[in-house]
Image (cartoon, rainbow, N blue to C red):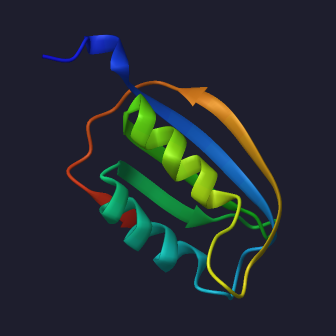
Amino acid sequence: MLAKNSRLCKRCVVSGLVQGVFYRASTAKQAAVIGVTGWVRNLPDGCVEAKICGEAAAVEKMIQWLWNGPARARVDDVAEHDAEFEEFADFTVQ
């Protein structure tokens, strides 16, 4: 049995060319592959925000993926913040 504190959530804000390049849909697909839950959405300033929850190692793997994104994206920065843990059924595009 895993320790309760091995599950966590991170809120990430991704900047660069990340809207109009299938970033959200690709993020949701990758989240399913990695096995994390949460959501991803566009922000009015052109950034993409994601809340990623799951086992610490899987969350870290997902954050590393955010730095690359899909082929047409250009990621300039991923600002990572601790977030309160929440249980989600899956990973959704908002």
Quarter of the image for the C terminus: give it: bottom left
> Image point 34% across, 49% down: which residue?
36
Return the x and y of residue 34 as percentages of the image width and height.
36, 56
Residue 23 lies in what quarter of the image? bottom right
Quarter of the image for the N terminus: give it: top left
> Image point 69% across, 66% down: which residue?
68
Return the x and y of residue 81 as percentages of the image width and height.
66, 31
How many discs appear? 0
In the rendered structure, the answer to whether residue 84 lies left or right of residue 17 reads: left
Q: Is residue 87 above or below residue 64?
A: above
Return the x and y of residue 92 as percentages of the image width and height.
36, 64
Q: Is residue 65 above or below residue 64?
A: below
Q: Is residue 2 above or below residue 83?
A: above
In the rendered structure, the answer to whether residue 27 lies left or right of residue 28 reads: right
Query: For this rendering, which residue is in front, 33 or 88?
Result: 33
Q: Is residue 42 above or below residue 73?
A: above
> Image point 46% across, 24% down: which residue?
84
Return the x and y of residue 29 as percentages of the image width and height.
39, 73
Whether residue 53 is visible? yes
Whether residue 94 is visible? no
Query: For this rendering, which residue is in front, 6 or 47?
Result: 6
> Image point 20% across, 50% down: which residue?
89
